[in-house]
Image: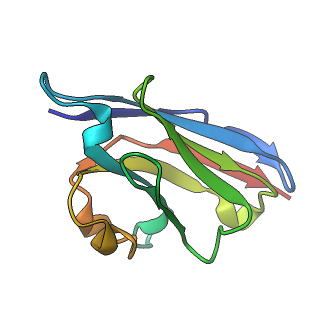
Amino acid sequence: QVQLVESGGGSVQTGGSLRLSCLTSVPRGDRFSDYHMGWFRQTPHKDREGLAAISQLSASTVYADSVEGRFTISRDNAKNTLYLDMNNLTPEDSAVYYCAAARAGMWASLEKLRATDFTYWGRGTQVTVSS
């Protein structure tokens, strides 16, 4: 099974920055680069919001309007790790952040950043931004 573990969450003030990481283990015979990856976030009583996705070899990325220009998704396939660099944070960015994986296939569908298009999920890491 694919297992994802997020880290790097915490509390920051408005305007601050954080880097989230997602260490991924994949089944024997698979490679991390066999999977497209994404970041999502969720607050109570709201649907999970897609933030960014990156294709298996980093050739393509996509961002939600709410984070474009402030967040950067990247991956290091040698380290089986996905990253999300978050800058200029505001209280509206406070949420539990999740990484997700989808076995490489139709990248075009993942560009819509729908949670239902991703198969594997981490347990999340809390980000709190204070004013």
| Residue 110, image x, y percentages | 33, 68
Q: Residue at x 25, y 31 (%)?
A: 31
Evaluate whether residue 4 shows in this view.
Answer: yes
Quadrant location, the N terminus: top left
Where on the picture, by quarter, is residue 107?
bottom left
Where on the picture, by quarter, is residue 20?
top right
The vertical placement of 116 against 18, above or below, is below
| Residue 22, image x, y percentages | 46, 35
Evaluate whether residue 41 shows in this view.
Answer: no
Q: Residue at x 21, y 35 (%)?
A: 2
Question: Which of 87/92 is in front?
Answer: 87
The reply, left or right, for residue 49 in relation to residue 68 is: left
Identify the colour scheme used: rainbow
| Residue 117, image x, y percentages | 25, 66
The vertical placement of 5 against 16, above or below, is above
Question: Which of 13/7 is in front?
Answer: 7
Q: Residue at x 47, y 60 (%)?
A: 60
Q: Residue at x 32, y 73 (%)?
A: 108
- Number of numbered discs visible in the structure rendering: 0
Quadrant location, the C terminus: bottom right
The reply, left or right, for residue 75 in relation to residue 108 is: right
Question: Which of 72/104 is in front?
Answer: 104
